[in-house]
Image: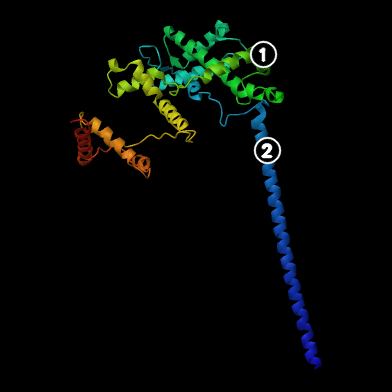
Amino acid sequence: MVRSEAVSTPTKKKKKSKSLEVRKSKCSKSKEKSSATNSSATGISKRKKKSNKKAAVVDDGCTGGLKLLKGHTVTMASLTKAQVLKDPLEVELDQHGDPLEANGSNLQSYTGVLARTKVPINIESWPKVGKLLKNTIWDTILESFDLEPSERKMVIKSAGVKWREFKSRLTCQYVLPYIDDPESLKFPPDDYRFITPDVWKDFVKSRLTPEFLEKHEKQRERRLQNQYNHRMSRKGYRGLKRELIKMGIPEEDIDRTLLWIKGQWKEIVNNAISNFNSDRNKKGRRKINWKNMRGIPEQNDTTSCGYYVMRYMRDIVLDTERTFADKWASRTGKPCPYEQVKIDEVRDELAGYVLKNMID
């Protein structure tokens, strides 16, 4: 019995020692994990501090003013590169002296950049801008574009329009909405860091005078009476005319009425639908979603255009499940013409309607 006790006691001690070893090993592992987490946490905190330092370095130029734009302002860096390479871009003009194609768009954009950055906004009006500033804009334009001296008037006029638009945008978005918040008007907008504090202070002061506020209110009420807004961006009616000529419409057939309808037809339809809903006390959508249809059928000849249009309208009217947009939007490549059976079906329906309702 004694032997058995003697033998049993050390075995128990050994088990205790094993359990102690296990506990120690677990504790050591947990300590290692905690130390690893602590080291990782310190590493993350260090990285955060570094990133904060980098962010602080990036925001050194912050003005402290409002920032409403999601992106950055346009700088036209590609044209600055053209200045360095001394390779001016050629610009083609139409018969009215308006710039054409891609380089024409670049010229317009770059003119706007120079008008915003070179001419202070605290000047009362464009005629009061000095010749020195206007010559600076023209000379800078010539460093990037190959233009004739006779085209200076066009560039300076365009710069004046863009400068006035810039001042109007600042007034409507950065000044008037914050009349009751003087702290927001204290510094220049962070979106336009080229505006100096002194210039911004003078500009805000001129926009908060009773005379200007009265004038602004009159213009706003007058603007609300306009039912057909400009929807063609930079293209304008002259650009629309060039598009119609490319589509094959003779230039002599393009008059002011056609251009106005082509340029405003979406607005006309929107107003017609809203008037229809208001007359019937019907609540419709606040805004109509327009979709460009891809793969709209195109006739194979020059005589069946009317039947194609009627077939197209028929498909829209009879599409009760409203899958017409998805049907044509899924088509890619060259437009697929209607089958002759589809065109004959519309022709027969039209003939039957004429015989029944219009011929005795």
Location of the N terminus (image quadrant): bottom right
Count of marks overlaid on the render = 2
Which residue is located at x 43 percent, y 7 percent? Answer: 149
Front residue of 336 and 76: 336
Q: CA distance from mark 2 to mark 1?
A: 44 Å
Q: Which residue is mark 2?
A: 52
Indicate whether 141 appears above or below 27: above
Q: Position of residue 279 (x, y in %)?
A: 45, 30
Q: Which residue is mark 1?
A: 210
Q: Position of residue 357 (x, y in %)?
A: 22, 33
Name which of mark 2 and mark 1 comes first in the sequence.
2
Residue 226's disc number: none
Name of the residue lying farthest toward the front: 360
Name of the residue lying farthest toward the right: 2
Q: Crowding near pointer 2: few (<14 within 10 Å), some, many (20+)?
A: few
Question: Which residue type carries mark 1?
Answer: Pro
2 vs 1, front mark = 1
Q: Position of residue 321 (x, y in %)?
A: 37, 45
Question: Which residue type carries mark 2?
Answer: Asn
> Going by the image, does 80 lie left or right of 350?
right
Location of the C terminus (image quadrant): top left
Q: Crowding near pointer 1: few (<14 within 10 Å), some, many (20+)?
A: few
